[in-house]
Image (cartoon, rainbow, N blue to C red):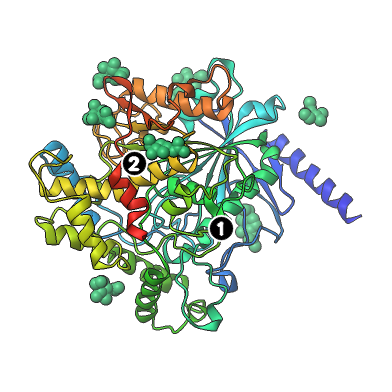
Amino acid sequence: MKFRSSISQAFMVLALSDATLGLPVVDLLTSVHQGSLEGNGTFYGFNNVPYAEPPLGELRFRVPIPKISINRTVNDGSTTRICPQASGAWFGLSVPFLFETLTGQPPPSGPAPPSGPDPRESEDCLYLNVKSPRKVFDNNLSNLPVLVWIHGGGFTMGYKDQFDPTGLMAQGMSNGKNGFVYVGINYRLGLFGFPPKGPSFRDWDVATNAGLYDQRLALLWVQKNIHKFGGNPNQVTVMGESAGGSSIAAQLTAFYGIDGEAPFNRAVIQSPAIRPATDATVYAGVYQQFSSAAGVSSMDQARDLTTTQLQSLNSAIVANSSFGHFTFGPNVDGLFFPDELVRSLSSRRVDSSVDVIVAYNLNEGLLFTDPRVTDNTGFKNYFAGLMPSIPASKINQLATTVYPEDFSGAQPYTTQIQRLVLAVAESLIHCNAFATDLGYNNQTRSYKFSVWPGVHSADTSYTFYNGQPVDNFGFPINATIAQHFQKWWVDYTTLGEGSGSSITEIPIYTSQAKILNITDTGNFVVRDPAAGARCRFWIDGLYN
Ligand SMILES: *[C@@H]1O[C@H](CO)[C@@H](O)[C@H](O)[C@H]1NC(C)=O
Ligand SMILES: *[C@@H]1O[C@H](CO)[C@@H](O)[C@H](O)[C@H]1NC(C)=O
Ligand SMILES: *[C@@H]1O[C@H](CO)[C@@H](O)[C@H](O)[C@H]1NC(C)=O
Ligand SMILES: *[C@@H]1O[C@H](CO)[C@@H](O)[C@H](O)[C@H]1NC(C)=O
Ligand SMILES: *[C@@H]1O[C@H](CO)[C@@H](O)[C@H](O)[C@H]1NC(C)=O
Ligand SMILES: *[C@@H]1O[C@H](CO)[C@@H](O)[C@H](O)[C@H]1NC(C)=O
Ligand SMILES: *[C@@H]1O[C@H](CO)[C@@H](O)[C@H](O)[C@H]1NC(C)=O
């Protein structure tokens, strides 16, 4: 009886919305979602769909649990929630440095940054957006391929609505093609997503990688529910940049990398960025810092603080991070994040059943470089701050053997600051990409995005190209390159490696370390400069 009445309720909902607006309604049983027309009427957006119970109260700092509580009021998606955000104060130095280096000018003055938290921020933030081609509902299409985007932002910033997929969707539906279903997800960030654990026994079930478990739950939600939005759970591509890229690598190495375990089929890992050497010692330091600032003696006690209190602690601690990192982020837990990412990857503890594309950009280092470094002591201090658990002997090795202070032209740098820029790029990003190639027996496809200026995250404006003339830094976008770049992602999502897929323009890495160098004057197959002794240090030498 109960069953029958909920069915008839669902029909009432459908009939009502059809009659009033003609907009589709998807019934997930625990919640009911109405789409809205987006992309100039070409697709429906089902926005702010909950995939977990709100991680509040006793659920704070824990592994998320699936949505079980029931709310059958039709959700039109109009209330946007994003996770609490926080950013490093060092951007105040690195961003001007980036612009001065590239243009000889200070950064263009943009609008003043908003004061105080974004009103959309909420601790209750485990939501995702689904965008389905209009034909799914208007013509009853089903089983379309799925593209899931995991945003970046240093594990302390970013959100599901940050980038508009209209251009990608349009490319997917061009020439009468059916397109694909797009999903953008939120996951907990900063202190909320990567809470440190104290020694108190009450802290036994603090999940220091909760944010990665959020991503996994969202991906499992896709497996279970995406067919209701016209998607095929057996054809899921996951794509992400920066922290989103390293998140995907973490999903592939979770639980020591069991084949078939990652709930997706293909991955596009762009500029995978992660702080090296984030072991239990480092995270114990983060706990000390948090507990003394918060005045608590366990994370269990911190469950009694208000969101506002935690948000301001999160902001203050992340702002105070030393150059190049954000304090909170993935840390070795022996389970979901079993080991340092480069070690898990390079020793092939990965889900090898997934097809992988991995990439980095031309000028990754600038955004994370401390422009005040003028000598060898400054160089060493940068890395001592980034990796507090690494002994001085290793930092010395870094400064003498790996990146010797030799500006004669024998090294790929001729000034002190170029030396730092390269070491930063390799340690935070390039070598993670190389470790991914190694993890997949060199069967990856790899590229380097060298379109000027190729700074960290500039490629995201190409992935989400919507005709805008400039990227998120204000540098010009080459429309020809952007459209071709999007074609790769659309083809990979919809055709994979199959016939007619343009993705095969990107070569298989092989033991020759082949990558496609994407430049302003064309694409060239070259040898990966990351495949060498310096990255071997970041992958093995640092930890042995
Ligand atoms: C929106 O669609 C209309 C009608 O198809 C078209 O004329 C217009 O150019 C489109 N606008 C954009 C921004 O694509
Ligand atoms: C139930 O969902 C509706 C629509 O999304 C929302 O406005 C309302 O606040 C929700 N109620 C509860 C108790 O969460
Ligand atoms: C839509 O497709 C489903 C399965 O593909 C089918 O069962 C259903 O009858 C179709 N509905 C309409 C209105 O064509
Ligand atoms: C900021 O960092 C410095 C140096 O690491 C430390 O001494 C200070 O306590 C920190 N402040 C906060 C609010 O965490
Ligand atoms: C993968 O490529 C790298 C770089 O060329 C090489 O050092 C390594 O031996 C290769 N591994 C395998 C399994 O072919
Ligand atoms: C890739 O292209 C860029 C831009 O033209 C160039 O600076 C760089 O040296 C090239 N990289 C490789 C490895 O050839
Ligand atoms: C854009 O890229 C294409 C393809 O590499 C190139 O032919 C063209 O000259 C570029 N346009 C500009 C304005 O740089």
Residue 380's label in the rendered image is none
Disc 1 is placed on an element classified as helix
Which of the pair 30/22 is nearer the observer?
Answer: 30
User: Badge 2: how crowded within 10 Å, few (<14), some, or many (20+)?
Assistant: many
Q: Residue 393: where, in percent of width, then height?
A: 24, 65
- Comparing 452 with 524, the one in front is 524
Secondary structure beneath disc 2?
A: loop
Q: Is residue 336 visible?
A: yes
Quarter of the figure that contains the C terminus = bottom left
**Mark 1 neighbour class, 10 Å CA radius: few under 14, some 14 to 19, many 20 or more:** many
Front one among 450 and 175: 450
Give the left or right position of residue 265, taking residue 280 as reference. right
How far, Cα to Cα, is label 2 from label 1? 24 Å
Say which quarter of the image contains residue 355: top right
Q: Which residue appears farthest toward the right when viewing the image?
A: 1
Q: Position of residue 263 (x, y in %)?
A: 62, 45
- Rendered residue at 10%/42% (across/down): 414
Q: What label sits on residue 457 in the rendered view?
A: 2
Asked if the residues shown at circle 2 and circle 1 are in contact, with their CB atoms under 8 angstroms apart, the answer is no
Residue 395, how many percent across, how many down?
Answer: 23, 61
Q: Is residue 427 above or below residue 174?
A: below
Q: Position of residue 296 (x, y in %)?
A: 43, 83
Q: Quadrant of residue 137?
A: top right
On screen, residue 275 versus residue 245, left or right, reads: left
Q: Amino acid at mark 2?
A: Ser
Ligand 2 located in image quadrant: bottom right
Report the amino acid beneath label 1: Tyr
Q: Is residue 420 above or below residue 466?
A: below
233 with respect to 524 (left or right): right
Check disc 1 and report the residue beneath it.
Answer: 213
